[in-house]
Image: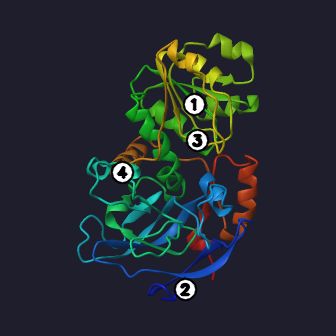
Amino acid sequence: MVSKSPELEHPKPAFGWAARDQSGLLSPFKFSRRETAENDVAFKVLYCGICHSDLHMTKNEWGVTQYPCIPGHEIVGIVTEVGSKVEKFKVGDRVGVGCMVGSCRSCDSCHNNLENYCPKMILTYGAKNYDGTITYGGYSDIMVANEHFIVRIPDNLSLDVGAPLLCAGITVYSPLRYFGLDKPGMHVGVVGLGGLGHVAVKFAKAMGVKVTVISTSPNKKQEAVENLGADSFLVSRDQDQMQAAMGTLDGIIDTVSAVHPMPPLLALLKSHGKLVLVGAPVKPLELHAFALISGRKIVGGSCIGGMKETQEMIDFAAKHNITANVEVIPMDYVNTAMERMLKGDVRYRFVIDVAKTLNP
């Protein structure tokens, strides 16, 4: 059987921007979406956040990209159509889709509302869907997904600043909850003040936690303390500062995606402290056993969150007025935005104004 072109494989015409090869360069692309099935929700995409993983995927840096690749998994918009068996959503609702659009729904992880750890999880873009076609992300005009993987966006949460929470927000919210770093009065460190780190500070503060930002950039101190509400700031390259803070943290959320030394971070933890990785360096990190043994310390990891927890996170954000700090851009600026993101030149998340600037 000859496979159909992306434009013809489904009935609904769609339009977006895609990368065609490892250059990662994005350009206009015609494709198609499936018809709205009985359990599906279709929506017009209004905004889509740019995540660091979009950069990795468009350039095939993780070795799994299938081209053409339409990135985007911080997608928000307005419902245009619902399937006959959809119960939770109606036309006109404000909704979002995060990092996944499918899972097996029958394994232990799925039964425990942890679809993000399902071995058959289907990513929002660049993955094989149930019907064998490749999933396309939110740098596009329309989206169709099963209602189970749709998040309701509360009316008091603006869509442009809410979009990044669907990836960045849940990525930091879930480990704070799971590893018990959400108890008022605790002291938590956040490594890296980027797209993930800045929302980690906001969520932790809203939970009543004392927050120390740990960064290689001394010039981020004012931003961290005065604008984001962190209680203190450590320059990780300043040995005196790091020495003075040894043994003071209950836990650390490490958002950095570049290779960086673990021992200095583990030294900041109290006994029984937890260092949780949510950034994903491509190369292995060095870990010394004694750094863990001497204080019964734990190094863990966390990957986004299940659908139930993602909805909880969005509702918590709306209640506590937590939003991402964003720079809204037009669709045709996306390649420049990727270059700037690679240099760390964004405070702190790019969001594409899809509805107003995506023109066929």
The quadrant of the rendering that contains the C terminus is bottom right
Q: Which residue is mark 1?
A: 190
Give the class, few, some or many, for how many residues have Cα within 10 Å of label 1's Cα (few <14, many ≥20).
Answer: many
Please name the colour scheme applied to the rendered image.
rainbow
Mark 2 against mark 1, which lies toward the viewer? 2
Name above or below for residue 103 compared with residue 168.
below
Gap in angstroms between the C-alphas marked 4 and 3: 22 Å
Name above or below for residue 194 compared with residue 190.
below
Name above or below for residue 138 compared with residue 157.
below
Q: Which residue is mark 3?
A: 279
Estimate the x, y position of residue 143 in percent, counting from the top left. Answer: 46, 72
Apparent side of residue 202 relative to residue 42 in the rendered image (left or right): right
| Amino acid on which disc 1 is placed | Val
Query: Which element type, helix, strand or loop, lies under badge 3?
Result: loop
Of labels 4 and 2, earlier in sequence is 2
| Mark linked to residue 354 | none
Mark 3 against mark 1, which lies toward the viewer? 3
Q: Which residue is mark 4?
A: 311
Of labels 2 and 1, earlier in sequence is 2
Query: Which element type, helix, strand or loop, lies under badge 2?
Result: loop
Estimate the x, y position of residue 182 in percent, counting from the top left. Answer: 41, 29
Q: Which residue is mark 2?
A: 7
The front one of 251 and 351 is 251
